[in-house]
Image (tube, rainbow, N blue to C red):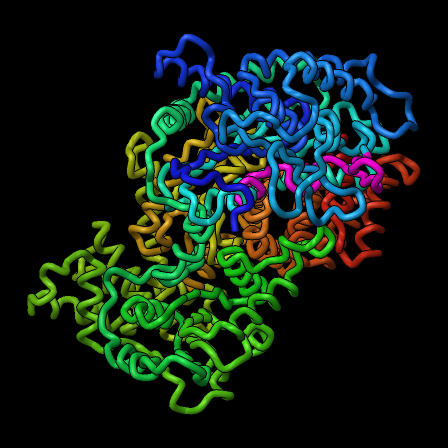
Amino acid sequence: MAQHASPGVDKPVILLALDGGGIRGLSELLILDEIMRRVKYDLNLTEMPRPCEYFDLIGGTSTGGLIALMLGRLRMSTDEALRAYNSLACTIFSKNNRKRKGQDGMFKASTLENKVKEVVSKKDLGDRMLDPSTQSSKGKAFVCAVPANNMEHPRRFRTYPVRTLASVNCKIWEAARATTAAPTFFKRIAIGEEDQALEEFVDGGLKCNNPANQVLDEARDVYGNDRLVRCLISIGTGHPGTIGLSKPDTFQKFLPTKLIDVLKKIATDCEKTANDISVRFRDVENFYFRFNVVHGAEGISLEEWEKLGILTEHTKAYMSRVSVSKDIDKIVHILCHPENTGITLRTICGVPHILKLPQPVRVRPQPIPSPIFTGREDVIETLEKFFSPRPYGPTPRREYLLHGLGGAGKTQVALQFAKKYQNRFSRIYWIDASNRPTIEQSYKAIAADNNIDSSSKDSKEAQVDRDTTTALVLRWFANLNQEWLLLFDNCESIKNLHDFVPHGPYGNILFTSRDPTLGLTLPPNTIYEISEMENEDAITLLLRASRLNDKEMDEGLRQRARPVAKILGFLPLAIDIAGASIHMGRYDLDDYINTFRDHREIMMKDSTFTGASRYNQAVYTAWDISYDTLKSFAKGSKDSTKCQDAKAALQILNLCAFWHNEGIMEEIFRRAAENQHLTNDPKAQYSFDYATKVPDLLKVNVEKNWDPFLFRKGVSTLLSFSLMKQDRSKRYFSMHVLVHSWARDHIPSTAKPHQLYIATALLSSSISWRYLTEDYTFRRQLLPHIKECKKHGEAAEIIKLDNLEDASKFSLVFYEGGHWQEAEELEVQVMETRKRVLGEEHPESRAMEGGRRAVCASDGDVQEGAWGGASRHADQHG
């Protein structure tokens, strides 16, 4: 029930949330000032309009809370607030206001108190939080603070009365002190009603530095679920990278202190909240607006008031961007013309669930059904009958296994079935079951997609833990009384599956595997062997793959295609690759057979392929022909587009050969390019078989943004040859396991060390030491690729992670993925090397040893600062 709704008011409310961020709060005021100036211009006003006349509810934390009080309770215009804010920042964070070392807080809190009192006195609107004015229902404001003895539940100090859980009607300066009492900056403040016990408060940023969710919750409490809402505007203080202090001392720099952990959590909290809300409201047009300066703010620490001019420049540059300016114009239009869109707070707060119900939920990356899928009607029909519709209510779990030769088309059969009968299932998930890490990765994606995580727990419990995440997802499936479908693709062993199949009576599971023994625990009628295609279906597929499908009924053409399909063993994968090669124009149906026989004869003389089955020979030979075609294109004129595309394709192929065959991300190349670690690496200049050099794939434009043109042309060429597949987003790629192994096996033994080095270095270069939500997500997706590089290096004894930066970064990925042992092994390697170089008594060596012990003592259950921090700082000096 609403606590303080104004009767008869039916205009939609407009909400504003302001992040914390020290002196960088100036950026928020500058953005708001630009909005209000455009409002003044569009409405032809003579005076600067005040935000309290246009925003119904303003919520802020820390420096954002201070601004919320200025704009809401003190009813300032943005230019008034800017003057007051600059005066506050310059005085509070000046050298004259610093305390002596060893005292509670770095700056004198009394100065902040006096400055706020001075501002309040000048406005002459009362000195208590509750606003005595009843002139307008707009301009309500609250600030967030955290009780020092119960940090789980942030407290809201309001400028308006509420019916339940009302906050203390304290002085305005007290609320300002409570919301800005950041650790190490200002001491805590005790607040309470007269003659009652006092309660200590600290900076609200420790729990909700981005208060957007707090604003939404407060709006429902104040206005009620049925109140119309127009938009939510959230403004940040600039992408921080990791919030820090300027010029940290040795203790802060090298040791995993609680202070550093807290500040990193604050930085992560802002962007994680922003990203989550962005996803939540992605389908609600013009409702959620987020502004946050992208570049420049990360170099300005919380207290560096002397850099306000630099911050102003970066903020104005950010607002000059076309996309940002367009969003500002949209907000100005809403403020000037707040039309009714029919959206209520009840609707908007229920959007995530409403939006997910109509369509099956799918996790990316996942393969897509082939557009030239042919035949297999018998197995599709069998699956359709087995997974037939059934009445709602308790029903037995249904499990089915498709097994058969590699390249027989098991995955495509499963995907075609799921696509054709998707309306039977409320949710469909594809699981890469090739090994334990890939299954864990798939479950983490499911957890993220359905908010099945431990984000509501405290920081200690919320550590990334693979076992906990898996258990939560398995429990979720076990209790999900719906007709969901899990596709466990490419299962390698029963051992891998044992811990990952949900218990319970609900749902449906479809397995694909080359191993028939996976069916030993299943009834005989739940197992189907996928073998070679029917002759006529194989011919049709070959003509479709060759882009001759408009003539697939031509009997003469089918007769010419018949011997090609036969020599390829009627195997779909081999036929698909051969058809793509024919389509690319180097061969036709008549001479492909002789080419195939010649290549197979040469290939079988290589000891690597001794003992290969007839079907594997078909795939490998077809692949070898395609690879030979790519090389011939790469040898062409250097100025030709086909030549450049082929060279890029060859290098991408050689790199991906050492990564996992699923979940290959374009994002790896973008991040590596923009980090520019490989640009001047002489080893990265190595290439063979006319492949392009890696730095050519990583070129950036004048703004230092990656130019993906050559990479995408190379990928397009690989797709044309059916050597690589892509998912619907066109940002994730995969290779069939047989093609993937051949791509690696064909590399000469003399070239493998170089190629493995480059593949490993590229992964390392893509990893940053940032801790935003997207960085955590990206690093988690790298885990299978890093494990593959590590496995190939150890198996062939051709590479070791001698580069300490690589070892530290990979240690971070293992650590965040819950692979504690692998993380510790790499960190010990870094630590021992540092000891040899710097000596055991060097501060960096001691710091790293302290971080390692902290992890060991807690089984990995610590924040990043205790693990990656020491290594990163040490590497910066190596």
Q: Quadrant of the C terminus?
A: top right
What residue sits 58% from the left and 42% below the top? Answer: 214
Quarter of the figure with residue 381: bottom left
Q: How many marks?
A: 0
Left or right side of 205 for 513: left
The image quarter in which residue 79 lies: top right
Residues 219 and 797: in front is 219
Left or right side of 527 for 844: right
Q: Residue at x 46, y 20 (%)?
A: 319
Which residues, given as a range, are shown in magenta?
190-217
**Residue 555, position as x, y percentages in the image:** 7, 69
Kindly identify the residue that appears in the image at 72 percent across and 45 percent down. Answer: 864
* Residue 256 visible in the displayed image: no
Above or below for 860 versus 106? below
Position above or below: 233 against 382: above
Whether the magenta-drawn stretch holds residue 227 is answered as no
Q: Residue at x 42, y 81 (%)?
A: 393
Membership of 199 in magenta stretch: yes
Q: Is residue 734 above or below residue 808?
A: below
Residue extending furthest toward the top: 46
Q: Is residue 483 visible?
A: yes
